Amino acid sequence: DFFEMHYNFLLLLAFAHTATSFKVFIDGSAGTTGLQVRDRLKNRPEITLIDPPDSMRKDESTRKEFMLKSDVTILCLPDSASSDSARWLTESGDTNTVLIDASTAFRVDPDFTYGFAELCEGQREAIKNSKRISNPGCYPTGFIALTRPLVSGGLLPEGSALTVNAISGYSGGGKQLMEIHEAGEAEPWGAYGFNLAHKHLPEMSLYSKLGKAPIFQPQVGSFPQGMVVSVPLHYGSLAEGVTGEKIWKELKGWYKDSKFVKVMELESGEYLERGAFLRPDTLMNTNKMELFVFANDSAQQCVLCARLDNLGKGASGAAVQNMNLALGLDEDAGL
């Protein structure tokens, strides 16, 4: 009868959906980000990871071959190697493979879609329709998440001169820095970026819509994973009448439908360890990001903070989120 036919049709559809398998090649799968991407994908039935033999991982022709036979290639490579890989794919004439690059090489390249789905209205659709996606940097993810809504909403003027204070777990420095820390040979805390030319600045300036690079003061702590990005603001540098509460309401509205970004309540004392300390590592191994507004109206100041996992929403989690979107899968699959 009709109902039995309809039921069988639905079963066929479900089988066809689950039977679809996408081939994914992680170029640079032995690095910190690559390993985390692999961990997030290895048990997913709709994903087939394709890998060259270990002895051929760095062989150029082998890498080209695997890129071309993949549905998605995720590049977890240094900038120069990522640039080479993208060039090979373009020169091959391939128009089917989705390329997701986790390096800095293409983050402000107009031919690549910036892979921060929460950036603005339409960005998620742009990622869904793109074959060239640049994964955001870890620090910029926090900075842009805090500032873009305020610039777009007219609360923070374009061209504002900001500072960014941020701390990351030592895994952000890759295997070499991890080995130094794990051997007990590292300083307990280290600031860097004193040349004021950090490679994350161009995307921070562009995608925040500020059009001006902030003074960026990154630091590395003696913990493996996690990150807090802080942006201090004087009310006098904001649009007239803007307060911490108005900023909080703007952020709350911007991210109200987000699966991964959560704006925490304005009275944020309960989120502080022993009433004083904002831990950087509470979102480890997740693709979540939490945004905080700490305001003091009488001082006419506030500090905005973003907390995320530098290897999660700041790297491998975002790459998987972008892959899901580009393949038409549920955005939070495997996350």
Image (tube, rainbow, N blue to C red):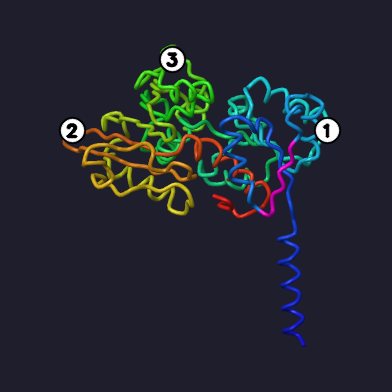
Disc 3 element: loop
Q: Quadrant of the N terminus?
A: bottom right
* Magenta residue span: 45-51
Q: Amino acid at mark 2?
A: Ala
**Residue depicted at 43% across the width and 53% down the height:** 256
**Residue depicted at 62% across the width and 24% down the height:** 105
Question: Residue furthest toward the top?
Answer: 195
In the image, 71: left or right of 259? Answer: right
Q: CA distance from mark 2 to mark 1?
A: 59 Å
**Residue depicted at 60% across the width and 40% down the height:** 37
User: Which label sits on residue 196?
Assistant: 3
Q: Is residue 197 above or below residue 114?
A: above
Q: State yes or no: residue 46 in magenta.
A: yes
Q: CA distance from mark 3 to mark 2?
A: 29 Å
Q: Is residue 19 above or below residue 271?
A: below
- Could you tell me residue 87's position as x and y percent? 75, 25
Q: Are marks 3 and 2 in contact (CB under 8 Å)?
A: no
**Can residue 87 be seen?**
yes
- Could you tell me residue 208's position as x and y percent? 47, 32
**Can residue 209 be seen?**
no
In this view, the residue in front, 92 or 191, is 191
Q: CA distance from mark 3 to mark 1?
A: 39 Å
User: Which label sits on residue 299?
Assistant: 2
Judging by the rendered image, the residue that carries numbered circle 1 is 93
Mark 1 or mark 2, which is nearer the start of the sequence?
1
